[in-house]
Image (spheres, rainbow, N blue to C red):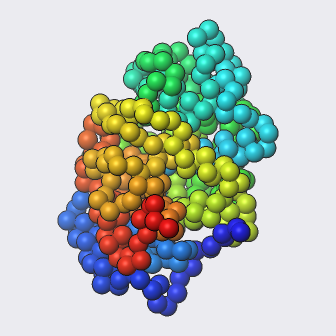
C-alpha cells in the first residue's frame, strides 16, 4: 500500500505530542536568535504528515523584512541529496547505471587508472578523491584577473570548478574509505547535465521541484525569490568576505551539483515527506520505493569516514543521504535521534532530517555565526531542535521494536 501523506496542519496537536515541550522549544530558539548566535532561523517539523512546529525568527538581512518559512536559504550541501535524486531518476529511465565507469559519462575521466571509478563511488564519497588538490587550481583561476570564456550552457562558477577539477589526483584507492568531498557531486551534477541533455537546474525542476510543488526551490532564483533569500553578511562564515563565498553576485546563477541549491524550510519539509512516503507526494511519483530504499541504505560496511581533518568510525552513507548510527558527530547529532534516521546537512546551518520509523521530519535552517575549520556548526542549534522535538513525542518508537 502506497503511503502518500501530504503536509497539513490541524487545530490541535496529534495525540502523544506534548504542547509544553513545543512551547519550551519556541523559547529556546527565540533565545538563540536574540543572543546573536544566528540572525535568522526557520524550523518546520511534521509527524505523520501533520505539521507540529512551524516557526521563523529573525530577518533576511540587517534591516530587512522578517524571515518566513517560505523564504529560501542557500542550503549548500543539501544540494547533494537532490543531485542523488536526479541520478536515480536517470537510472529509472534506463539512461544511466551507477555501476558504470564514470569515464563513460565524463570523457575527461576516460583515462588509464580510472577504469574502476564507478558512479556509485561518486554517490558514496568513496571515489578516492578529495578537494585539496582542486581548490588551489580553482583559486588561481578565480583571482587571475584574466578574462574567462564561459562555454555555452555553463555559468561562470560551474565552469571554473569543473575546468579546475579534471586534473585532480586521487589520494587513496577507490572504495577504500569515505572521504566527504565536493568534487564527487560536482562531477555528478555534470553527469546529470550530459546524460539528460538539459541543465541540472532544468532537470531538477522538471523531475523534482515542479511535481512536488516546491515553489521556493531552485538553483537559479527569480528576482522576487532572490529578494526574499536569507543572506549571509559581514564576517559571517561563507559570507561576502569569504574566499569561496556563496554571496558573490557573479555566482548568482551557479549550478554546482555540490552546493548551489536554494530552498525554504517548508519546501524541504515537502522533500522530507516524499522520502517518508517512499518516493511519492500529492499523487506525484518522483522515484520508486526501490530507489528510495537504496538512497536511504548504507552502501558500504566497515569504512572510516573523513570530514576535513576529522575521522569517524562506522559511518552509514547511502546515495546523497547519511544514516544515523551509534557514531555521534560533534556539533551535528543530538542525543535523542535514534539509529535509523536519515539526514543531510549543509555547511553554514542547513539541516534536513527524517525518521521513517516514527514518520517524523525536521527541517532547521539558520545562518551559523561560528564554524570550525572542518565546517562544523559550532554556533548551530540543529541538534537542540532535534532533541527537544523527540522529547515531545510520547509515542516514540525505537528501531527494532515491533
Q: Considering only vertical position in the picture, is 293 above or below 21?
A: above
Q: Position of residue 143 (x, y in %)?
A: 42, 24
What residue do we see at 56% from left, 42% from top? 319
- Most extreme residue toward the top, as rendered? 112
What residue do we see at 53% from left, 82% from top? 9
Q: Considering only vertical position in the picture, is 191 above or below 380?
A: above
- Most extreme residue toward the front, as rendered? 402
Q: Considering only vertical position in the picture, is 60 above or below 169?
A: below
For the N terminus, which image quadrant? bottom right
Q: Position of residue 164 (x, y in %)?
A: 52, 21
What residue do we see at 56% from left, 30% from top? 121
User: Is 62 left or right of 46, judged from the image as shown?
Assistant: left
Viewer-proximal residue, 347 or 382?
382
Q: Considering only vertical position in the picture, is 269 above or below 106?
A: below
User: Is 396 left or right of 34, judged from the image as shown?
Assistant: right
Q: Is residue 115 visible?
A: yes
Q: Is residue 80 visible?
A: no
Q: Quadrant of residue 137?
A: top left
Q: Position of residue 79 (x, y in %)?
A: 53, 46
User: Is 263 left or right of 388, judged from the image as shown?
Assistant: right
Q: Quadrant of residue 217?
A: bottom right
Amino acid at each position: 500500500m502506497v503511503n502518500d501523506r501530504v503536509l497539513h496542519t490541524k487545530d490541535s496537536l496529534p495525540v502523544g505530542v506534548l504542547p509544553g515541550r513545543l512551547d519550551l522549544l519556541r523559547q529556546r530558539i527565540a533565545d538563540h536568535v536574540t543572543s546573536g548566535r544566528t540572525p535568522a532561523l526557520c524550523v518546520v517539523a511534521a509527524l505523520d504528515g501533520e505539521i507540529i512546529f512551524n516557526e521563523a525568527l529573525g530577518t533576511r538581512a540587517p534591516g530587512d523584512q522578517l524571515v518566513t518559512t517560505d523564504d529560501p536559504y542557500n542550503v549548500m550541501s543539501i544540494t547533494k541529496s537532490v543531485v542523488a535524486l536526479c541520478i536515480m531518476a536517470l537510472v529509472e529511465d534506463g539512461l544511466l547505471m551507477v555501476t558504470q565507469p564514470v569515464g563513460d559519462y565524463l570523457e575527461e575521466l576516460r583515462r588509464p587508472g580510472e577504469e574502476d571509478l564507478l558512479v556509485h563511488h561518486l554517490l558514496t564519497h568513496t571515489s578516492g578523491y578529495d578537494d585539496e588538490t582542486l581548490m588551489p587550481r580553482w583559486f588561481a583561476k578565480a583571482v587571475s584577473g584574466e578574462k574567462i570564456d564561459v562555454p555555452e550552457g555553463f555559468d561562470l562558477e560551474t565552469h571554473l570548478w569543473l575546468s579546475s577539477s579534471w586534473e585532480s589526483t586521487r589520494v587513496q584507492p577507490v572504495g577504500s574509505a569515505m572521504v566527504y568531498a565536493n568534487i564527487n557531486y560536482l562531477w555528478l551534477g555534470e553527469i546529470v547535465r550530459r546524460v539528460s541533455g538539459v541543465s541540472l537546474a532544468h532537470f531538477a525542476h522538471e523531475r523534482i521541484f515542479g511535481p512536488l510543488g516546491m515553489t521556493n526551490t531552485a538553483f537559479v532564483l527569480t528576482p522576487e525569490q532572490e529578494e526574499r533569500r536569507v543572506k549571509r553578511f559581514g564576517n559571517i562564515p561563507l559570507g561576502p568576505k569569504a574566499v569561496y563565498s556563496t554571496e558573490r553576485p557573479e555566482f548568482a546563477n551557479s549550478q554546482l551539483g555540490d552546493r548551489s541549491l536554494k530552498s525554504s524550510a517548508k519546501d524541504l519539509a515537502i522533500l522530507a515527506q516524499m522520502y517518508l512516503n517512499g518516493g511519492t507526494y500529492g499523487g506525484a511519483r518522483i522515484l520508486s520505493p526501490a530507489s528510495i530504499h537504496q538512497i536511504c541504505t548504507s552502501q558500504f560496511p566497515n569504512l572510516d569516514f573523513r570530514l576535513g581533518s576529522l575521522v569517524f568510525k562506522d559511518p552509514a552513507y547511502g546515495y546523497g543521504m547519511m544514516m544515523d548510527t551509534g557514531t555521534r558527530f560533534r556539533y551535528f547529532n543530538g542525543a535523542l535521534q535514534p539509529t535509523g534516521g536519515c539526514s543531510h546537512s549543509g555547511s553554514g546551518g542547513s539541516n534536513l532530517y527524517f525518521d521513517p520509523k516514527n514518520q517524523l521530519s525536521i527541517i532547521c535552517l539558520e545562518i551559523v555565526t561560528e564554524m570550525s575549520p572542518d565546517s562544523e556548526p559550532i554556533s548551530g542549534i540543529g541538534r537542540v531542535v532535534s532533541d527537544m522535538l523527540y522529547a515531545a513525542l510520547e509515542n516514540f518508537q525505537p528501531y527494532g521494536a515491533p
